[in-house]
């Protein structure tokens, strides 16, 4: 079994972050928390386009998710700041 390349690992982690965000949005929708959903989607809405082009600005994503996480610290289901730190570490090699 081969070891994944840093690009493959980065892609996996970014897709995992997006999956977590979508799961959280689904739960928020069930709770009818529209304001938090709008803020969350605002933080991640460009991810799919940039993932397909492989030109995602992880630092901007980190800023957007940090803003979301700070605003909803008590309500967020996932630790996006930790995920982004891990992604940045992979990206830096």
Image (tube, rainbow, N blue to C red):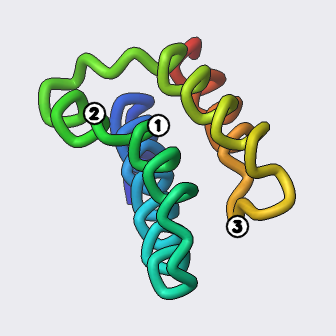
- Residue at 46%, 37% in the rendered image: 43
Q: Which mark is residue 77?
A: 3
Please say if 77 is above or below 67. Answer: below
Q: Residues within 10 Å of mark 3 (few under 14, many from 20)?
A: some
Identify the element where label 3 is drawn.
Answer: loop
The numbered mark, 3 or 1, whose residue comes first in the sequence reads 1
Please say if 16 is above or below 49. Answer: below
- Residue at 22%, 24% in the rendered image: 54
Q: Which mark is residue 58?
A: none
Give coordinates of residue 4: x percent, y percent: 40, 44
Task: Report how far apart the C-alphas of labels 1 and 2 lie in the structure.
Answer: 8 Å
Residue, disc 2:
46
Give coordinates of residue 40: x percent, y percent: 50, 49
Q: Residues within 10 Å of mark 1 (few under 14, many from 20)?
A: many
Residue, disc 1:
43
Identify the element where label 1 is drawn.
Answer: helix
Name the side, left or right, on which 4 lies relative to 71.
left
Please say if 9 is above or below 20. Answer: above
Of residues 68 and 79, the one drawn nearer to the viewer in this rendering? 68
Please say if 6 is above or below 17. Answer: above
Task: Report how far apart the C-alphas of labels 3 and 1 lie in the structure.
Answer: 15 Å
- Say which quadrant the N terminus sits in: bottom left
Task: Report how far apart the C-alphas of labels 3 and 2 lie in the structure.
Answer: 21 Å
């Amino acid at each position: 079994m081969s070891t994944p390349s840093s690009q493959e690992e980065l892609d996996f982690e970014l897709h995992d972050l997006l999956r977590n965000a979508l799961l959280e949005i689904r739960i928020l929708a069930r709770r009818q928390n529209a304001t938090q959903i709008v803020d969350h989607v605002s933080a991640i809405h460009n991810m799919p386009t940039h993932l397909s082009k492989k030109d995602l600005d992880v630092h901007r994503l980190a800023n957007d998710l940090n803003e979301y996480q700070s605003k909803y610290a008590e309500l967020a289901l996932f630790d996006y700041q930790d995920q982004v730190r891990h992604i940045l570490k992979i990206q830096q090699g």
